[in-house]
Image (cartoon, rainbow, N blue to C red):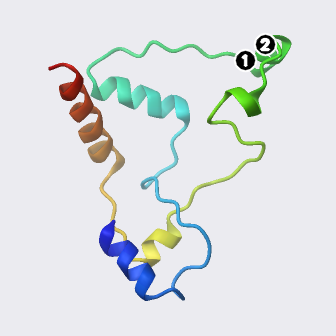
Amino acid sequence: AAAALLKRMQNPQISAGKIFHFGDAPVTLKQFINYCFQYAGLKPNTADAPAAQLQKQNYDFAKLNPYFNPFDYVLATANAQLLGWKHSPREKWLKEIVQYYVKLYNK
């Protein structure tokens, strides 16, 4: 990451706009949560809540949900790749992070 940022600072013409890098494939929030449970050695304990049901309860998506955006978007890795970023597979880095925190909090 540091090498990619240095390259960007030394070559401002390489990239115009924001750079987002989240891995090699899109992941839904539910998939991300399931991966975290799996890598922690736990069984997922989640439930879906239909938007219509939440709206009936006056749930304000924009104010209460940190993952809500009023628009659709796709995160792409093209700008990061222009900087020479080479990412590890999601399964590798996410598993390492989750297992680090499992060990940290189970001491």
Q: Is residue 107 above or below residue 82?
A: above
Mark 2: amino acid: Gln
Image quarter where the N terminus lies is bottom left
At x 37%, y 70%, the residue is 85
Mark 1 secondary-structure assignment: loop
Q: Is residue 87 above or below residue 78?
A: above
At x 76%, y 16%, the residue is 54
Kindly identify which numbered label has been placed on residue 53: 2
At x 53%, y 66%, the residue is 19
In the image, 65 versus 30, the foreground residue is 65
Q: Position of residue 62 (x, y in %)?
A: 75, 34
Mark 1: amino acid: Pro
Task: Decide: few, some or many residues near mark 1? Use Cα within 10 Å; few <14, some 14-19, many ≥20.
Answer: few
Q: Is residue 59 above or below residue 104?
A: above
Q: Is disc 2 in contact with disc 1, using a CB cutoff of under 8 Å?
A: yes
- Residue position for label 1: 50
Q: Would you say 77 lies left or right of 85 here?
A: right
Task: Decide: few, some or many residues near mark 2? Use Cα within 10 Å; few <14, some 14-19, many ≥20.
Answer: few
Q: Is residue 82 above or below residue 99?
A: below
Q: Position of residue 58 (x, y in %)?
A: 83, 16
